[in-house]
Image (tube, rainbow, N blue to C red):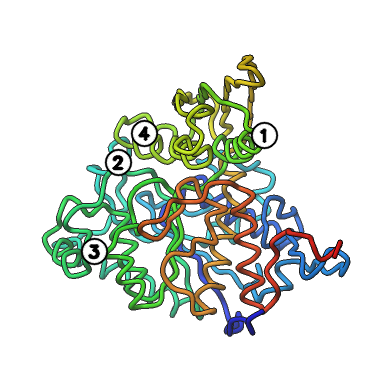
Amino acid sequence: MTKGTTIAPAEGKLGILFVGLGAVSTTTIAGILAIRKGLAKPFGSLTQMGTVRLGRRTDNRSPAIRDFVPLAGLDQLVFGAWDIFAEDCYEAAKTAGVLESSLLEQLKAELSAIKPMPAVFDRQFVKRLDGPNLKKGINKRELAEQVAADIRQFKKDHQVSRVVVIWCGSTEIYMKDGPAHQTLEAFEKALEQSDPSIPSSMVYAYAAIKEGVPYANAAPNLSADVPALLELAQKTGSPLAGKDLKTGQTLIKTIIAPGLKARLLGVSGWYSTNILGNRDGEVLADPESFKAKETTKKSVLDYILQPNLYPELYGNLHHVVRINFYPPRGDNKEGWDNIDLVGWLGYPMQLKVNFLCRDSILAAPIVLDVVLFLDLARRAGLSGIQEWLSFYFKSPMHAAGLYPEHDLFIQLMKLKNTLRYMRGEELITHLGREYYD
């Protein structure tokens, strides 16, 4: 095997800057603080609870991931945010209604100290929200410079050595890349002209990447995944990950669909519907924002089942995705799936799934993992798209000309093999001939 990658140590503090201080961000921050105090366990976090097998199965070498690669510790993390509302993290967490008041009260002092900076926001891209805590500038280039200045000031004020920026804001309207997104020169000109094809998330992405900071997109909208920002990332060394965190219904799809395909069971229909009542649900009630979410959710089955290779099994799959805003449910999302299967000799069968989940509870450990792994990538000299983090996303960023890998188990193998590669360990293929030769 190769001699591995040189990884700079995780010295000093690591700042996490959240774009949006809503349910996901506050649940992540409060959760990390609670874990640091010994009040809870980091269930769902690969970086905190996962292991990685090294060598043969008979070697019995399976260290914790956090011991195998030099990740920042939870006690090194410092939090900041931008938001269109000025309420502090404690008040925002109460508004989100995800975590119990008894837990928030134990964290009140730390949460109250986290006050959001004014945000870049345009209702053209998120039509069902508005707020007063906004930046002002003569054009989008100036707004991006203000965000970059915020990053530098945050590092100075909190004496952090490194920063990761993650978009946890609301889903913007569906967009495709256009002429303004093709080159860095065209993109910067578009910023100066406040081109309507540059949404708020791209302003943050540009500012972070320009500063050489890792950037992740937890939402489904177009953000850093355009040629111009990929070009910039190669220049500045910023690692990128996204998009759209794989939490509830899509997580279940990427677990079930590979199993059905592995056994070559046909699928004639897959009907998915959700109800949720949080701010995300309210935003997704707008058809243009929903289209961005629908696109990422529906693409999963196409790539896993590969109907072009298995036309008799999946060529006529009828795939429907619905999301309904239902305020009484709050952050406790419920997802129903009805799957119509075709078995031996064409006999029909059905599989029904009812997943009563907590959206932000599922998202928080993913945010933590993505941030820690992006910081690791930066210290390892890895820039641009980090495809090995596809494990965490509904619509993984990937190189031009490639199709994205959606199979959760292949994604996990890719992630762990990347860690092995970094440390100079043999990659594991699961061939297993060595035990029988």
Which residue has dot 1 on it? 263
Quarter in which the C terminus is drawn: bottom right
Dot 1: what SS? loop
Instruction: Give 282 or 254, whichever is nearer the viewer.
Output: 254
Nearer the camera: disc 2 or disc 1: 1
Residues under labels 4 and 3: Cα distance? Answer: 27 Å
Where 434 falls versus 271 (above or below)?
A: below
Seen at 38% across and 38% down, the residue is: 295
Mark 2 or 4, nearer chain start? 2
Q: From this viewpoint, which residue is outermost toward the left? A: 193
Where 52 falls versus 383 (above or below)?
A: above
Dot 4: what SS? helix
Instruction: Give 72 or 223, whichever is nearer the viewer.
Output: 223
Mark 2 or 1, nearer chain start? 2
Question: Tags 1 and 4 in contact by the CB under 8 Å rule?
Answer: no
Nearer the camera: disc 3 or disc 1: 1
Nearer the camera: disc 1 or disc 4: 1
Which residue has dot 2 on it? 173
Q: Position of residue 53 (x, y in %)?
A: 77, 65
Residues under labels 3 and 1: Cα distance? Answer: 52 Å
Question: Tags 3 and 2 in contact by the CB under 8 Å rule?
Answer: no
Which residue has dot 4 on it? 290
Mark 1 or 4, nearer chain start? 1
Residue 143: which disc? 3
Q: From this viewpoint, which residue is outermost toward the top? A: 347
Q: Residue type at mark 3?
A: Leu
